[in-house]
Amino acid sequence: MQNCDLITSHPEPRTLLISRSMSFSACHRLHSNFLSDEENKNIFGKCNNPNGHGHNYKVTVTLRGKVDPVTGMVMNLTDLKKYMEESIMVPLDHSNVDKDVPYFRNVVSTVENITVFIWEELRKRIPAGLLYEVCVDETDSNKAVYRGE
């Protein structure tokens, strides 16, 4: 077997981080059902506009795991792309997050909560122990990072 030397040359698989990014567009309104209209306006300002506002979000998903000595991969990136499509694009892209995604009916759609939502959706699909980090850039200036803690 041609790869035999490769497999035996590193008896301990190396641990690496791999990442994949994708973008989606969505609108939302920062508004808590647990606060009065006045409190919402004072806390969220122009982001509490009743008509909402939109963003072009960028999501970077990072996995951490051992490199398989046979495939040379932590995970097949084609599989990760599929999981990200199912977890991010299907529920969020070109949506009104607050109205179209049941998770946000009583959860304020901040970048923090969107990041947690994406983590939870990915966790259902990615093999246990591989998901390391989800980073969501809401704007060039605002981002949230979540590692499942």
Image (spheres, rainbow, N blue to C red):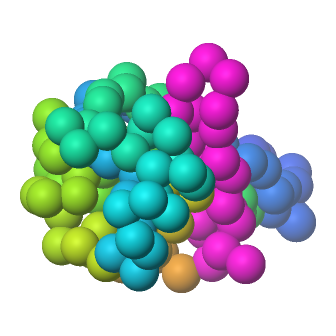
43 left or right of 13? left
The quadrant where residue 86 appears: bottom left
Residue 118 sits above or below residue 41 on the image: below
109 left or right of 143? left
The quadrant of the image that shows the C terminus is: bottom right
For image coordinates 34% across by 75% down, the residue present is 33
For image coordinates 59% across by 65% down, the residue present is 131
For image coordinates 23% across by 73% down, the residue present is 105
Which stretch appears magenta? 129-149
Residue 130 sits above or below residue 79 on the image: below
Residue 38 appears in view: yes
Front residue of this view, candidates 19 and 25:
25
Residue 122, horizontal then vertical, whole percent: 41, 66
For image coordinates 51% across by 33% down, the residue present is 138
Front residue of this view, candidates 35 and 94:
35
Residue 108 sits above or below residue 135 on the image: below
Front residue of this view, candidates 103 and 7:
103
